[in-house]
Amino acid sequence: MSALFIILALLLGLAMGAAIGFLLRQRQDTELILRAQAEADVLRRSTQAEVQRLLEGARAQQGELLRQAQRRLEDDAVRARSALEADLTRERQAAELELRRVLGDAEREGARIREARDELRRDRERLDATEERLTRRGEQQDARALKLDDLEARLDERADALKAQETELEAERGAIQTRLFEIAQLTREEATATIMTQLDTELEREKAVRIRAQLDKADAEAKRKSTNIIAQAIQRSASEVSAAISVSVVPIPSDAMKGRIIGREGRNIRAFEALTGVDLIIDDTPEAVLLSSFNPIRREVAKLALTELVTDGRIHPARIEETVHKAQSDMQTYIRERGDEAALEANVVGLKAGMLQLLGRMHFRTSYGQNVLKHSVQVAHLTGIIAAEIGLDEALARRAGLLHDIGKSIDREIEGTHTEIGANLARRFGEPTEVLDAIANHHELELSETLYPIIVSAADAISAARPGARRESLENYLKRLEGLETIATSFPGVEKSYAIQAGREIRIIVEPDKIDDASAVLLARDIASRIEQDMEYPGQVQVTVVRESRAVQYAR
């Protein structure tokens, strides 16, 4: 029993100990929780303070960063504004340059328009003067028609009088014949033959006189009609001639290059045509474009520039302007070189630079297919030879021969004949008086004051008329000369005939005892008619009949 109480007491003590231990453990845990909560509160308050401090520092740093970013933005804005102002300045300068260039082009175009207006005014004045001359000529023609009517009436009256006289003459004729038979002791047939021979001679003379009068009248009428015929011929053939002498072909590597030459919205081709003054024609011709201009120097400059652009491949307005300026400079150098070479070949010294430049321009001028510069050099050699033979200054003659056509270098740019223009140019460059005389009067020898225009004219004719000089083969040339002489010698009474001046004149020597002065007119007319019927020739052929009477006696 006591052991059971002890066990129960022990068990109860253990239970109470366990309960007390549990309560103590629970109290410790509660204290730990409370302490942890207190530490957590302290830690939370300290953390909140730290967070608040960090937030305040972050706000301060953010404000500083914002201020720094604002300063950087302001600096970037200043730099951007400076760069923008610099770009605007460059663009403004480029726009000013473009504006000045456009204004210059506009001024040049205005000058061309003024020149065209002046030319139109001069054409109008010439037309007015021509119209006035035509009006006066019409009035003269009307007056002439009245005179012709009056003359016709007088001729009718004279014809009636002649008929009456013819009747009287018939009556007298019988008496004269009878008297002649008695005096001359001739038969009727012999007397009739003698009278008919005399009448034939008188009729031939009368016919020659009338033919000469009709020829003079026909020449006057032919001059009027020939003007209209020539004008029509020029109008009909102008396009073909212009196409033959005013178009150059520039090869290109492929047809794709045509689009690059045209450029965007045509800006390249417009810039090229404005800078060169040449029409650029782009059509369906494969791998080629055309340059059209009446001025061969402009056309050659355009050809050089376009060839350079096609070879280089960079085609835009700025590059076109640069290339055209370079081509123009190269062309001036090329022209000067051609002038120097011509002067050296002709052995002419002392020419001024401007005269050499004008001389070189003639390299691009042709006359009937003959290069004018080469023609001038040949004339210089011929004039030197002729002058040396007749005792004139050979060097001065060569100088006159070389410069005789200098006016042709600019005769398409200013008004006047090439002789007037050439004489003015030579006077401006201080050429000698003999040279001025040769230039001004080598086509009008009656106005010449020295012998130099005469020898220059002779050399000019020799150079132009030599075989092959003006697009005529030697064979055709010789055949034409032979044909002219054959036709002339086929007529009775012709002693000799000579084709001279490259077949532009046939000189005929007749027998004076067979051909009298009146018959010479008929002979010239018949030969000219035969030449027109049987031959083909350029221009016209002058038929000159020479009749010479000689009386020879010997003193013994």
Image: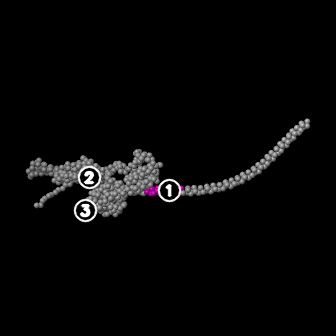
Q: Nearer the viewer, residue 148 or 268?
A: 268
Q: Please state if 250 lies on the left or on the right of 219 as rendered.
A: right
- Amino acid carrying label 1: it is Ala
Amino acid beneath label 2: Ala
In which quadrant will I find the C terminus?
bottom left
User: At 8% from the left edge and 50% from the top edge, which residue is drawn?
Assistant: 185
Where residue 498 appears, x then y in whole percent?
22, 52
The numbered mark at residue 498 is: none
Task: Name the outermost residue toward the top.
Answer: 1
Sequence-wise first label, 1 or 3:
1
The mark nearer the N terminus, 1 or 2, is 1
Q: Is residue 523 in sight in this rendering?
A: yes
Left or right position of 184 against 517: left
Q: Nearer the viewer, residue 90 or 41?
A: 41
Asked whether disc 3 touches disc 2, contact meaning CB atoms under 8 Å apart, the reply is no
- Element at label 2: loop
Q: Is residue 296 left or right of residue 30?
A: left
Q: Is residue 100 magenta?
A: yes
Extent of the magenta region: 87-108
* Disc 3 secondary structure class: loop
Q: CA distance from mark 1 to mark 3?
A: 67 Å
- Check residue 172 for magenta coloring: no
| Residue indicated by mark 3 | 391
Amino acid on which disc 3 is placed: Gly
Judging from the image, the colouring scheme is one colour
Is there any visible trace of residue 526 in the rendered image? no
The residue tagged 1 is 94
Q: Which residue is mark 2?
A: 502
Q: Nearer the viewer, mark 3 or mark 2?
A: 3
- Along the viewing direction, whichever of 168 and 481 lies nearer the viewer: 481
**Where residue 87 appears, x then y in whole percent?**
53, 56
